[in-house]
Amino acid sequence: MKSEIDAGGRGFTNARHCRLAALLLVAVFTQACGQHAATQDPPKAKAAAPSQLPNDTARFLAGLKGRPDGPYSKLEETAPWQKYAKDFDGIWAGIENGQFKKVDEFQQRELAGTKTNSSFVFYPLSGPDVLYANRFFPNAKVFVFAGLEPVGNLRPPSSYTPETMDRETRHWRLGVSSIIERSFFVTSEMDHQFRGEVFDGLLPMILLLLSRSGHTIVDVQYHKLTDDGKLEPEDPGTPPKKHQSVEVQFRRGEDPTVRTVYYFSRDLAAGFEKNPAFARFLTSLGTPDTLVKSGSFLLHWQMCNALRKYILENSNMVLQDDTGVPYAYFTKGGWDIRLFGQYSRPDKPFTNHYQKDLAAAFEDPARVRKLGFPLGYGAKRRPSSMILAMRPVKVAAAPAPAKN
């Protein structure tokens, strides 16, 4: 959200005054000295500065102390918020020193040296999972998330009261528990947690997780997508309002680089082909590295043929678990494949998506590398695995369509 500075009227008035003053000065100096005075340019209007509210809100939701004069300062003094913040500090220290330390080691060992020249990271069926996207792709500047869950809104600070903070913080703990404990957001839980029970969409959780993981929110903008795949600004309106997409700009720690995550609330099955605006937007960004994790095996289904086709034709690299693109598509396409961890049979209701060819590949120890952390469905209950597929040089990514 950007604050607005209405400088138009002032700029016009100042310009008129400056011109009158200049004419008087010219007359005076011409008569007195025979010299011409230079006219003064009208002052330029200041560019609109992003509001601090998104970052204030992100820190408040993440249990991190905000500005002393911020809109949540009094709420941060309540006992429920302080308990929530203290508990979250302990939980976060545990996951940083445990799970995320191992994820970072994997990233440095297996991904850091991989150069694909991709211009963005595409994460379909993502939910609000900015945690793993940023851990796997720490150098990416643009992320595109998409799923069926609604975008959501930033509630005004006045909608929170000291009397409701106990209930609010209990709900926030509930919303974040799945990604911390199981490494993914459970679809059935998101159906009610992000449709009113905890939040009215994914934006608040995206902000919470970005802030907790050391990021500063620079700006939040809502957009709608035109038929030709371009983004048009959308008025934030009065919550609750249904938005098509949101853009969150953020910085990491002391790094001045501004990074962007887009979240699109869209049908990625039949809708990906029937309404090609989203695919056109993706194409306008260039070629992606694609991440798929805990994707309900939707990319195995015929209804997601168009989405799977886009991934295979455009991605330079695909990092996924077994719920992503079926293994056979990579082997038939001649992709360079690396396997990590240990493959195990999917749980119900996905047992029919057991991949015999993938299981056979994992039986060859010479082809399998260490993963080092639990991930996805069955995490901490059965072995986890990941697949890294690199497009071979001889199989070029699909060229961008010619412009009419």
Image: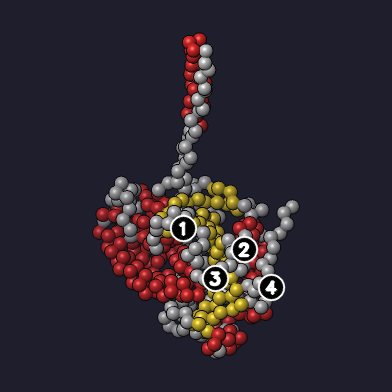
First along the sequence among labels 4 and 2: 2
Q: Amino acid at mark 4?
A: Lys
Give me the C-alpha separation between circle 3 and circle 4.
17 Å
Q: Residue at x 47, y 48 (%)?
A: 1
Rate crowding at label 2 as few (under 14), some (14 to 19) or many (20 or more) other CA atoms within 10 Å.
Answer: many
Which of discs 3 and 2 lies nearer the camera? The answer is 3
Q: Amino acid at mark 3?
A: Thr
Which of discs 2 and 1 lies nearer the camera? The answer is 2
Q: Please, what secondary structure does the residue beneath circle 4 have?
A: loop
Residue 262 appears in the rendering: yes
Which of discs 4 and 2 lies nearer the camera? The answer is 4
Tag shown at residue 114: 3
Tag shown at residue 394: 4
Quarter holding residue 177: bottom left
Q: Residue at x 52, y 46 (%)?
A: 235
Q: Amino acid at mark 1?
A: Leu
Q: Amino acid at mark 2?
A: Thr
Marks 4 and 1: CB-CB under 8 Å? Answer: no
- Image position of 348 with respect to 221: above or below: below
Q: Position of residue 95 (x, y in %)?
A: 37, 71
Residue 336 in the figure: left or right of residue 75: right
Q: Position of residue 264 (x, y in %)?
A: 55, 59
Q: Residue at x 30, y 53 (%)?
A: 75
Marks 4 and 2: CB-CB under 8 Å? Answer: no
- Image position of 141 with respect to 174: above or below: above
First along the sequence among labels 1 and 3: 3
First along the sequence among labels 4 and 1: 1
Report the residue marked by disc 1. Answer: 203
Report the residue marked by disc 2. Answer: 287
